[in-house]
Amino acid sequence: MITTTGQASTIEPMSLAEIAREHGDENVASRESVFQVRDLAVSYSGNTAIREVGLDVLKNAITAFIGPSGCGKSTLIRCFNRMNDLVPGAKVDGEVLYHGKDLYAADVDPVEVRRRIGMVFQKPNPFPKSIYDNVAFGPRVLAMKDDLSERVEGALQQAALWDEVKDRLKESALGLSGGQQQRLCIARCLAVEPDVILMDEPASALDPISTTRIEDLMHELKRQYTIVIVTHNMQQAARVADMTAFFSVDVAPDGGRRTGILVEYDKTAKIFTTPADKRTEDYVTGRFG
Amino acid sequence: MSSSEITTGLELRLRAQRRRVGEDVVKGALAVCALISVATTVGIVVALFVPAFEFFQEISIVDFLTGRDWSPLFQPAHFGVLPLVAGTLLVTAIASAVAMPFGLGAAIYLSEYASPRTRGILKPAFEVLAGIPTIVFGYFALTFVTPLLRDLGIEVDIFNTLSAGLVMGVMLMPTVASLSEDAMGAVPRDLRDGAHALGSTKVQVATRIVVPAAVSGIIASFVLAISRAVGETMIVLIAMGQQPNLALDPREAAETMTAFIAATGAGDVPTGSIEYKTIFAVGALLFVMTLVMNLFAIRLVRKYREVYE
Amino acid sequence: MSRGLKGGVFKGLLFLSLLVGFLMLAALLVDVFQDGLPYLDLTLLTNPPSSDPKIAGARPAILATIYIGVLLLLFVVPIGVGTAVYLEEYADKRRWYNKLLEINIQNLAAVPSIVYGILGLAFLVRGIGLGRVLLAGAMILTLLVLPTVIIAAREAIRSVPDSIRQGGYALGATQWQVVSRQVLPAAIPGIATGSILALSRAIGETAPLIMIGAVTYISFDPTILGPFTALPIQIYSFLRLPQEEFKLLAAASIIVLLAILLTLNAFAIFIRNRYRRTW
């Protein structure tokens, strides 16, 4: 680690701590919570993937889930929009409150949940249709009656893609580059006016330049939306996240069962400068993971 | 509704806005479609076994299965099914003697020797044989193969088992070849590479490594071919004749189970008569034979697919 | 040295196996065309059958085959695709009854075609009294090729990547919306190819139609609820008539049948190649 005199060195890369200090938002902890997770555990066909999770996701903040592979970050994020429902044998115990309402109550309709809580996936998954039809799909299935074309344009503008595609809306989405496809997926998600956007490793399949654009987009979007991202890239978490949750893998004493657990959750700056738990410190300093 | 409205003022509604009846209706309609295939099986079983059961109230099942005289339309009538079974088995044996070696040989060539490009051309061309309707094969057997056999000095009757069997064998070659080649293709490259690295020739690799590894798939292809031979109707109806014949002489005419069913079903036997019920008795026997073979073949295919996938 | 020779002989024998198949195919086609081509004329296509081979034709049979083909597609595509969608998208694969459903379909695909004829005879012709009509023939052929269509449709649906479905669900679409707006449209080429191949198989079938009571001599154009014949049946009946000329008419009719099948298969292959999608 190199200490600099107020200016980032142009030769040595910035440390995570420095990145976090530069980008962190000091006011974030005073915001209201959008999700309240209490004692959450998820199991697939009897095998617990993650357990004892408790945290609050704050409004208009970017919350990052980091940790080694197998710690259940993707499993957890999918609890927020009930995508785990689609996996046969998946079971969710504990409580997830969304604006105070139990997300897993018996009378809750997953479709209503997902119209409010959108998701962008690791590998861009545009539909094999035109760019226009991709963005229009959400509003169409949700019977959003107002002007479709305006909605599509608005979403593409918000996703910083409009200028690049405005002349070829009728062309197939599969002809776009990887970075463009991911921004298209973000536009698709924005078109239904969600409250929260979940992103499961949104840039891990993209080149560095596209990654930067997506990260800039996230900063823009958080003004209007609440964002939760899963990332295995610590620098990314330091750059974009206001709050960071570090997860780890708990191995059963006999070396068998591996379960994900939440180790520490705090402002990003704190996680990367003075983490409270030694396991967090080991991970962010690269001693393991 | 914009996101700000969701969280302030208006109550947050996570319940469905409309009762999603449509979804349940769709699922119901789709399940009904799936039930049609169940109904087909039930229909086949009922259609065959109810009249067959009635048949066996009048004719002893032992006499049926062991009797050597099949003359249901004569007076006095005899209902020993062995001649029909003999006809079926003889033509099946001849067909197998053609389809199995040649089909397997073609499969080994396509799988182990042909380049991917050649395979891409030859395999579909070979499959054309599989798409030709059986009545065309029947025509071929009657008008080409029988005269040819006579020209070659083999004294065959106009209707004979040999022609039918040979042509049926040609028809079944793609069945054997396709499934065997599938099974051989599923054998991992590593096995072949390992053997080559030890100095084996292509012949040895093919015969000692690949074929044994694919043997359950190959046997499945044989069993499936036999099952299809047993169930085949038009070739035997056209080229083999309608005379029940217990003498296993391929140069003579004979009748198979399927030919009998077709000829009788097309005729004007009165519904409910004992002659009418023979259709179902023989049909039930045919169904049971092919069912056993099909289930066996399906299990074999499942076995080899599981091992490598 | 002898190893190389042995290898060469072995390879030669294998190639011979392939060759036998091709030789037989060639002999068959030559035989059919040699006999039939001179008799392939407008008379065959437009005249009804007759006891005089000079003016006999196969027109009712050709029409009936076309009608049966159209009815078959109308029946088998919705039922086959519906079953495939149920099995792939809705059914819980761990349940025993769904596993049984799958085995049932695999087994039905291998039941001899004449057994389907018996089914038709017992239930449709005599059971519910539909009689020996074209509709019964179309229905039974539908059941015969239904497993084939189901299997092809399942393949096509399975090849649609799961990421598309996930994307659809994540936007708040219901299951039927995802299936009808994303999965099925992407699966259409595979479903179309499979259906056309099934149709081509059904058109060549004779045994079930014999059992249903397709007549061998019919001089008027067929109707859906009337007596009928079909091209394969017509060929069979020509073959059974004593005069030599009828055998040649049979060959000519075979050429017509093969031409229809060739067109259908070429169309199916065209669709498959044109709409092949690389995900």
Image (cartoon, coloured by chain):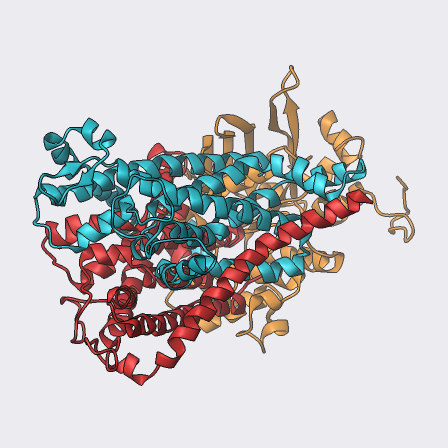
* Chain A image colour: orange
Q: Quadrant of the N terminus of chain B?
A: bottom left
**Which residue is at the far top?**
A254
Where residue C103 sits: x, y (%)? 37, 39
**Which residue is at the far bottom?**
C42
Residue visible at 20% across and 27% down in the picture: B62
Q: On the picture, is A288 further left or further right than B127? A: right
Q: Is residue A53 above or below residue B163?
A: above
* Chain B image colour: cyan
User: Can the viewer see residue C166?
Assistant: yes
Residue A172 vs residue C76, the one in the foreground: C76
Where residue B226 sits: x, y (%)? 42, 42
Where residue B254 sits: x, y (%)? 30, 47
Residue B248 vs residue B6, the one in the foreground: B248
Residue visible at 49% across and 48% down in the picture: B99
Q: On the picture, is B84 further left or further right than B165? A: left
User: Can the viewer see residue C171?
Assistant: no
Residue C157 vs residue B40, the one in the foreground: B40
Q: In this view, does C98 lie above or below A182?
A: above
Residue visible at 27% across and 55% down in the picture: C207
Where residue B96 sits: x, y (%)? 46, 44
* Chain C image colour: red
Name which quarter of the figure residue A30 lies in: top right
Q: Quadrant of the C terminus of chain B?
A: top right
Residue visible at 29% across and 79% down in the picture: C44
Residue B234 vs residue C131, the one in the foreground: B234
